[in-house]
């Protein structure tokens, strides 16, 4: 089943993110959630640029903001999810701090 493989792969990636985060010092890891980025794009992008050591590029931040979409896309609603896969997602999400605040509703 393609959807099952995609879900498994997603959580494998979440596991890798958590393993990597645990190996880094806090100043070596920047956690960015799309919802926060879209809510305060200028502030979030400036923080990201600062984190990466990218110098202020004048109108760069404003140019980036101008091409953003207004809210996160919820592509998961484009297909019908079997109940067992919804439950798998609900069980897996709490295991990963990088997914904190997300839910499958």
Image (tube, rainbow, N blue to C red):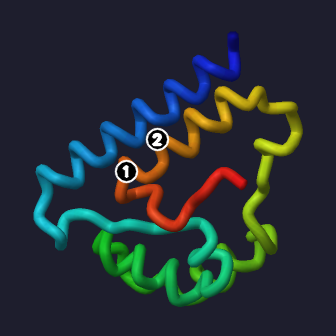
Mark 1 residue element: loop
Q: Position of residue 70 (x, y in %)?
A: 80, 74
Rendering quarter of residue 67: bottom right
Residue ID at (56%, 45%): 90
Instruction: State the residue position of label 1.
Output: 96
Label 2 to label 1: alpha-carbon separation? 7 Å
Reply above or below: 62 against 9: below
Q: Nearer the viewer, residue 13 or 50?
A: 13
Mark linked to residue 92: 2
Screen quadrant of the C terminus: bottom right
Identify which residue is drawn at 63% across, 72% down. 35
> Quadrant location of residue 16?
top left
- Judge the density around disc 1: few (<14), some (14-19), many (≥20) Cα neighbours within 10 Å: few
Answer left or right for 88 relative to 28: right
Mark 2 vs 1: CB contact within 8 A: yes
- Whole-percent x, y for residue 38 in the image: 67, 76
User: In percent of the image, x 78 and y 53: which residue is there?
Assistant: 74
């Amino acid at each position: 089943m393609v959807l099952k493989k995609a879900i498994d792969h997603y959580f494998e990636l979440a596991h890798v993110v958590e393993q990597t985060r645990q190996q880094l010092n806090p100043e070596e890891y920047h956690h960015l959630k799309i919802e926060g980025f879209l809510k305060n794009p200028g502030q979030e992008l400036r923080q990201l640029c600062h984190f990466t050591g990218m110098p202020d590029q004048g109108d760069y931040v404003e140019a980036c903001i101008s091409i953003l979409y207004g809210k996160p896309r919820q592509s998961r609603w484009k297909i019908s999810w079997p109940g067992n896969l919804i439950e798998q997602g609900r069980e897996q999400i709490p295991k990963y701090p990088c997914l904190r605040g997300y839910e499958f509703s």
